[in-house]
Image (cartoon, grey):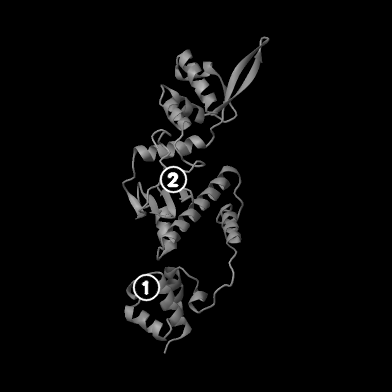
Amino acid sequence: MSNEFGDNLKRIRKEKGITQEQLAEAVGVSAQAVSKWEQGSFPDASLLPAAADYLGVKIDELFGRREEHVDLEQLIVRELNAAERDEEGNMLYGAEGEKSRMHCVWRLCHLLACAYMRCSNIREFSRMTVEGNIWNDAFTQIVDEGGFLQAKLNRQFQYFLVMPQPDEGYDNPGALAYREDTVELFRFLGQPNVLRVLTFLAEQNQRIFFDCETLREELGIDPANAQEIVEGLMRFRLVVQAELKRGGENEAIYQYRLDCNLISFLTFAHVLANPPRNFSVRIENRNTPYFTHTTYKKPEDA
């Protein structure tokens, strides 16, 4: 004769894709014991936490006591607030607190990825990959008709990207359609010393101003090349111009404005130049191309 506990245990186990043998091994009993629980008997109370943790549910849910409503926003806020405190509950201020909050967001993102791929043991898998860092140079990549998700896990270099499939495709006019200004940007970035200058500017305080003479002194760049680079930075709005009054004359000075966008650009340029080889998770369920509008064709070629 079944009971509500047994019915719930069996239902949840099957929804998670977990066998009786797997649950039994996680809890430390025989598969026959799990079978008996699902048929009407009850486990020892000391085994319930391990069973619930492995199934990724609360003990109450095994007994049919589900919460009617969970305020997801409040749960996330609570996690982020807790991340701002140390083990003794003291508030973390400044960079230490901000780093802790960012790591919390990173962990929550990876939990979502594990949930998206219907991982049978979300908490443990996420803990191993994010906190345990058992893969030295691992990526997570999930690709399907809904879009794609990609994350890099190792501590030296981390990112998390989610790009749902737009209704009009990734290459719609408002997104990644082929554009001549993009061609011009790549042409500019390939010119001598441009990437050196961008890297140099990214090392400076974002409130610092500079001029062509700064590039000559710091990087040894020829004045003509420095002027050409600055003009290109202005053209693509990567710097803004101001004026410094000196000796009755106004001199042009510049301020770097690319902010964190250079980091994201270089991140995916690095991935493109060094395709991932090691994956903690890789799911490829997409059959359609990413671009569908043939925007690379000139009107006369269409």
Q: Position of residue 275 (x, y in %)?
A: 33, 42
Q: Position of residue 190 (x, y in %)?
A: 40, 26
List the residue tagged with mark 1.
23
Q: Residue at x 52, y 25 (%)?
A: 233
In-image side of 83 versus 289 (left or right)? right
Q: Is residue 35 above or below residue 238?
A: below
Q: Quadrant of the N terminus?
A: bottom left
Neighbourhood count class around disc 2 (C-alpha, 10 Å): few under 14, some 14–19, many 20 upward: some
Inspect this view and state whether residue 44 appears.
Answer: no
Task: Residue type at mark 1: give it.
Answer: Leu
List the residue tagged with mark 2.
158
**Farthest residue toward the front?**
300
Neighbourhood count class around disc 1 (C-alpha, 10 Å): few under 14, some 14–19, many 20 upward: many
On the image, which quarter does residue 293 sit in?
Answer: top left
Q: Is residue 107 above or below residue 52?
A: above
Task: Give me the C-alpha separation between circle 1 and circle 2.
Answer: 33 Å
Question: Which SS class for mark 2?
Answer: loop
Q: Is residue 266 above or below residue 242?
A: below
